[in-house]
Amino acid sequence: MKKYIAATAIILLFLGLSNQALANRYKAGFSVNYYKPSDSNFKEPYRAGNMMFGLSLGINLLKRFEFRGELNYFRVKGEMTLSKEEITYIFTPLVAGLRYKVFKAGRIGPYLGLGADLCSYKEKVPERYGKVSGSKIGLHGEIGTLVKLAERFHLDINVRYLYVFNKSLNGIEREFGGLRAGIGIEFLF
């Protein structure tokens, strides 16, 4: 339920700011990233990171500032250490962030960004272990660049680090955050 409330709030914020945007330029995008959780306990059952896919909406607030919302999806399969039973980890951050465009040089526009993340997680394990799921709040910092491909299309090359608060999962210390790097395509309208 919290996810739906947060998603509705982000959409309403976009609609409310639409008349105030100076450039009146909106963005919709899709990204493909590699996500590597920073938890050392993650490596044994799941080995390494995996692909993370994302959808984004953005609005230019001023010449150099962009507010954006994202929904990302990360899923990786692994196996339990002793029994070798299959397990699956699903991580879905819902993101609200602000990007500052440092400068623009021709088709290139580097940026810095900060944001807040509502991170939902679920670990599918054998039934005898019970349910493992929940939500945590996190913050991210990012650096990237936009490359203008055509009048309405941009390539977004991005590196982001996510830090998630409240690391305890069923009494075990876990780090839900990690490093994400990838590429996206954005359509301006």
Image (spheres, helix red, strand yellow):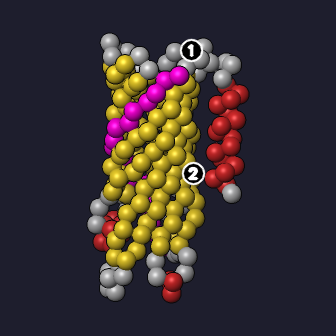
Q: Is 175 displayed left or right of 118 in the figure?
A: left
Q: Secondary structure at mark 2?
A: strand
Give how far across and how far down residue 115 sits, in percent.
Answer: 52, 39
Q: Is residue 134 visible?
A: yes
How far apart in space, not on screen, are marks 2 and 1 (Cα)? 29 Å
Q: Secondary structure at mark 1?
A: loop
163 or 97: nearer the eye? 97
Q: Which residues are magenta?
A: 172-189
**Quadrant, the N terminus:** bottom right
Mark identifier at residue 118: 2
Give how far across and how far down residue 32 sits, in percent.
Answer: 37, 44
86 or 38: nearer the eye? 86
Q: Which of labels 2 and 1 is toward the front?
A: 1
Q: Which residue is mark 1?
A: 23
Give how far across and how far down residue 154 sits, in percent.
Answer: 39, 25
Q: Is 158 displayed left or right of 55 in the figure?
A: left
Give how far across and how far down residue 167 sits, in percent.
Answer: 50, 63
Q: Is residue 175 magenta?
A: yes
Crowding at dot 1, Cα within 10 Å, few <14 / some 14-19 / many 20+, comes out as few
Residue at the image position 51 percent from the left and 51 percent from the top: 93
